[in-house]
Image (cartoon, coloured by chain):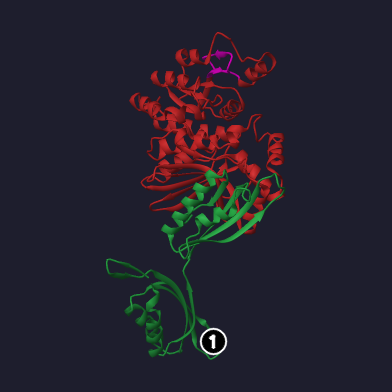
């Protein structure tokens, strides 16, 4: 947790919750109301009436974004409303992009390439696959970067492009946007 | 019905396609023609078949003293069709030929990328001043009506981004590397054998051809003011089979994508990763352009980007636009 001018700043964390509701009117509201009250941002709700848990409860999957420290408070509030929280998943690095690199990837210090992109809990290289045909030939790598948000991903890409230029690596990136 | 007199400059593959397409259209009569070495004028109409046969045996279609420049300056035509090969550095000699015609208040239709990418603002300015048409649908994506599609079909829509597969040679090579596991060199050799790549394919392979088309789109359709030097350009010669294989496992394809963003003023041609089901992932020599618009969302145009009759199709559409809009 950072402190800026004495104010505690908390980064929002994306959290997925699986809730079980009793199959009776007003239950969805009982689940939504505490989330709204606590100021969490709802990313998506999926509520399928035809899939029920073994005990006959309705399953609602919900993804919210809120300061991590407020999560226990939310869980308590949901339980008070008789909403069962059966699964909690927290993922910090929600923005994912894949790149392909071509060049002398290993011989230009792969560890350095990865280290320069990695910023703990902000942007990380989470997957690397390398194909090396012959020692003298160029190798090809698939690299996955995960980041907490678009801005952090943007910074990571800037660094990756810098490193690629320096090490004469061809970089192929994904087309962004909602094409 | 008015008879429109045509001067046809350039008797290569596109010129032949134009002659073929115009032969069946009673609205047009070709009264002058020129190749790189000679020219011929006949006010009552030329038989292009005869000219092409003559060119084949003698290497010339007509009189060596009658150059394209003289035809543009002296012949009594209504529309000049300029379909000589592209010179992306100076645009010449096509640039001068086109300018001469426009200054004489003649309509001009071209598929030559050089003059349009280098001097579209100046040429369109002259055309407007002289109240004549200067149209060049065939310069970008061949038979695909991308320029008219943007200008008229999507009129009023702000374009926020544009992505295109604008080079059929590169797309063919990537399709073959992806589908058959051919190396870049093998796929290029195959493209040459099939006539999809020129003897010197460097301007296709290094992205220059796509970049020139992107400049034309940017300057004439998106109100930008850019040159070839403004395009951040990477070709496909460095791609490995492994790269296409890795993309494939991930449900993706690699295509040479020309992209621009008018707000950020960025232009780029480079190999990019796209989901396989993206409409831009076309096969073989096809071209595709996706335009992201304010109201219509994303719209994709797909079709044949090169070829003799295909390019002639774009030229014919330009000619009919002129006959529809102007009285003479």
Mark 1 Cα-neighbour bin, 10 Å: few <14, some 14–19, many ≥20: few
Counting from the top left corner in percent of width and height, residue B95 is at: 46, 22
Q: Quadrant of residue B17?
A: top right
Q: Is residue B74 left or right of residue B312?
A: left
Considering depth in this image, is B204 or A140 the residue closer to the camera? A140
Residue A106 in magenta?
A: no
Q: Quadrant of the N terminus of chain A?
A: bottom left
Look at 61% across and 49% down and name the residue there: A105
Look at 60% across and 19% down and name the residue there: B47
Look at 41% across and 90% down and name the residue there: A82
Residue B44 in magenta?
A: yes
Question: Which chain is in green here?
Answer: A
Colour of chain B in the image: red
Considering depth in this image, is A111 or B327 the residue closer to the camera? A111
Q: Residue furthest top?
A: B65
Q: Which residue is mark 1?
A: A53
Secondary element type, mark 1: loop
Question: Relative to B197, is B75 above or below?
Answer: above
Total numbered circles: 1
Counting from the top left corner in percent of width and height, residue B49 is at: 64, 21
Q: Is residue B6 visible?
A: no
Counting from the top left corner in percent of width and height, residue A77 is at: 37, 86
Q: Which stretch did the figure color magenta?
A: B31-47
Counting from the top left corner in percent of width and height, residue A108 is at: 60, 48
Subunit under mark 1: A
């Amino acid at each position: 947790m950072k402190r800026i001018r004495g104010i505690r700043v908390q980064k929002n964390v994306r959290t997925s919750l699986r809730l079980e509701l009793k199959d009776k009117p007003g239950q969805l509201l009982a689940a939504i109301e505490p989330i709204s009250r606590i100021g969490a941002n709802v990313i998506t709700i999926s509520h399928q009436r035809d899939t029920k848990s073994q005990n006959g409860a309705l399953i609602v999957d919900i993804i919210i974004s809120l300061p991590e420290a407020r999560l226990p408070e939310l869980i308590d509030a949901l339980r008070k409303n008789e909403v069962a929280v059966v699964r909690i998943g927290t993922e910090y690095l929600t923005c994912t992009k894949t790149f392909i690199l071509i060049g002398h990837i290993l011989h230009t210090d792969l560890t350095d390439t990865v280290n320069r992109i990695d910023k703990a809990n902000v942007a990380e290289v989470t997957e690397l696959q390398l194909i090396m045909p012959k020692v003298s030939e160029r190798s090809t790598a698939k690299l996955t970067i995960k980041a907490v948000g678009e801005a952090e991903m943007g910074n990571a890409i800037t660094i990756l492009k810098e490193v690629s230029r320096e090490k004469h690596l061809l970089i192929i990136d994904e087309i962004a946007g909602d094409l | 019905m008015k008879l429109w007199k045509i001067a046809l400059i350039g008797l290569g593959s596109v010129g032949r396609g134009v002659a073929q397409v115009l032969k069946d259209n009673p609205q047009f009569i070709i009264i002058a023609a020129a190749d790189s070495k000679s020219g011929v004028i006949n006010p009552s109409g030329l038989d292009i078949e005869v000219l092409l046969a003559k060119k084949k045996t003698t290497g010339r279609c007509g009189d060596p003293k009658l150059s394209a420049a003289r035809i543009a300056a002296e012949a009594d035509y209504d529309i000049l069709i300029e379909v000589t090969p592209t010179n992306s550095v100076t645009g010449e000699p096509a640039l001068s030929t086109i300018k001469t015609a426009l200054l004489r208040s003649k309509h001009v239709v071209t598929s030559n990328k050089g003059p349009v990418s280098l001097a579209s603002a100046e040429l369109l300015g002259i055309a407007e001043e002289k109240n004549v048409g200067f149209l060049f649908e065939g310069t970008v994506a061949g038979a695909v009506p991308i320029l008219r599609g943007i200008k008229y079909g999507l009129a009023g829509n702000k374009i926020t981004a544009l992505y295109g597969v604008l080079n059929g040679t590169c797309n063919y090579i990537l399709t073959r590397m992806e589908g058959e596991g051919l190396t870049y060199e093998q796929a290029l050799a195959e493209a040459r054998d099939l006539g999809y790549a020129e003897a010197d394919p460097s301007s296709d392979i290094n992205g220059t051809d796509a970049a020139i088309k992107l400049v034309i789109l940017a300057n004439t359709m998106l109100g930008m003011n850019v040159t070839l030097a403004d395009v951040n350009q990477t070709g496909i010669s460095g791609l490995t089979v492994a790269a296409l294989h890795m993309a494939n496992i991930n449900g993706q394809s690699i295509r040479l994508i020309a992209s621009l963003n008018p707000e950020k003023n960025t232009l780029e041609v480079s190999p990019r990763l796209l989901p396989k089901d993206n409409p831009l992932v076309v096969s073989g020599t096809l071209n595709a352009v996706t335009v992201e618009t304010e109201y219509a969302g994303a719209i994709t145009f797909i079709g044949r980007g090169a070829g003799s009759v295909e390019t002639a199709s774009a030229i014919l559409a330009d000619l009919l636009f002129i006959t529809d809009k102007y009285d003479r």
